Each structure stands twice: as C-alpha cells, then as structure tokens.
Amino acid sequence: MSRLLLASILLLLLASCGGGKFSAPRNLEDACAIVSERPEYWRAMKDTERRWGVPIHVQMATIHQESKFIGNARTPHRYALGIIPMGRQSTAYGYSQALDGTWEEYQQETRNRSARRDRISDATDFMGWYMDGSTKGLGISKWDARAQYLAYHEGRTGYVRGSYNAKSWLVDVADRVQRRSETYRAQLSACGRI
C-alpha cells in the first residue's frame, strides 16, 4: 500500500473520531444521563455550586438553553442581501455563550486570565460568578432560574429596565428555562445526585 493511501486512510479515521470534545451529551432531556455520560460536567457544576451558591439544576438549565452543552457553540452568521457574510450575530461563545466583554470582566475580577469559554469548568464558574452578581446587585434568588436567565440574557441593566417585557419570545424562553430547571432538579433528586 502506498504511503499516500495509508496516510489518507489514517487521516480519514482520525477525522471520523474528531468533534467529540465539544459535542453535546446524547440525552439532553435527562440530567442524570448528562452527568453520568460527562462526569466532568458534574464536578464543574458542583464546584460552582460550592463557590458561588448557584444550584446545579439552574446551571444545567441555563447551559441547555444557551448552548445545548456544545462547548464551542457560536451564534449564527449575519448576511447582507442574504448572501454576503457580515460576521456573527454577537461575540457569544462556548457553553455559557458569554460575550467577549463580559468574559474579560470575569477573567479580570476572578484573576483567572487563562479561563476559556469552551472549558466546562470555566464556563460554569463564569455562570456562577455572573448569577452571584445578579443576586447581590439585583436581589434575584439563585434558585430562580427564570429571573436569573432574564438578567443573564439581557444584562443586569436591561433586566432592571425590564427590556425583556418587549420581547415575548424571550419571556417564553425564560419560562422554559424555569421548567427545565425544575425537571432537572427532580431528576437529579431521583438519581441521588442532590
């Protein structure tokens, strides 16, 4: 067999195995299945719960909504005239879909300059940091997935202004995040995780 053919086969095999690092768990509807398949998620969320006090089920519901647990998730591209690429809709990236500016603020405040948005432990820590700030600054309970999500999505200033009230779709999304949080909590309780 020629070296070129052997190298091509090897490259094809490696490529077929790739993508797993950032792929979503198989069953996003079952919190117990997620943490069983990805024990590193459980450890990261547990550490965040200990450090920031944000319950695991609230973290999970928010991550589900933001990225569906895809580590390198990005917002869609924008197009002019339907065909000319104009960049992405925002700088949101990773599990938590943190924006560049907010991520840099997190890195600076926590003195964690090596934090990465596509690393689950950093993404959950960011989420805990942000939600802790929403609790301290706005009085939102860390158990209130709906209100935490609205402040997370709109920013704290937008939340205070009630900008979400003009976005019925976002209110519906926040309601879904709350329901998913409650479902995840019940599932984690049933499998002895909480």
Image (spheres, helix red, strand yellow):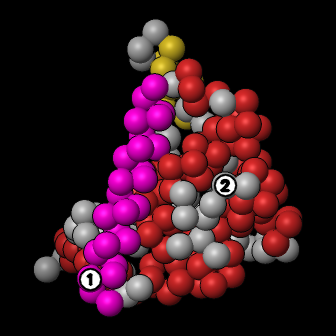
Q: In the figure, is residue 114 to the left or right of 168?
A: right
Tag 2 residue:
140
Q: Nearer the viewer, residue 127 or 171?
A: 171
Residue 45 percent coordinates (x, y)? 52, 78
Q: Residue at x 51, y 66 (%)?
A: 59
**Magenta-colored span:** 168-192
The disc, 2 or 1, on the residue closer to the chain's N-terminal end is 2
Can residue 3 be seen in this snapshot?
no
| Element carrying mark 2 | loop
Q: State whether the magenta stretch is mostly helix, strand or loop.
A: helix
Q: Amino acid at mark 2?
A: Ile
Q: Which mark is residue 72?
A: none
Q: Is 100 part of what is drawn in magenta?
A: no
Q: Nearer the viewer, residue 63 or 114?
A: 63
**Taking 87 as reference, is 56 above or below it?**
below
Q: Residue at x 80, y 54 (%)?
A: 137
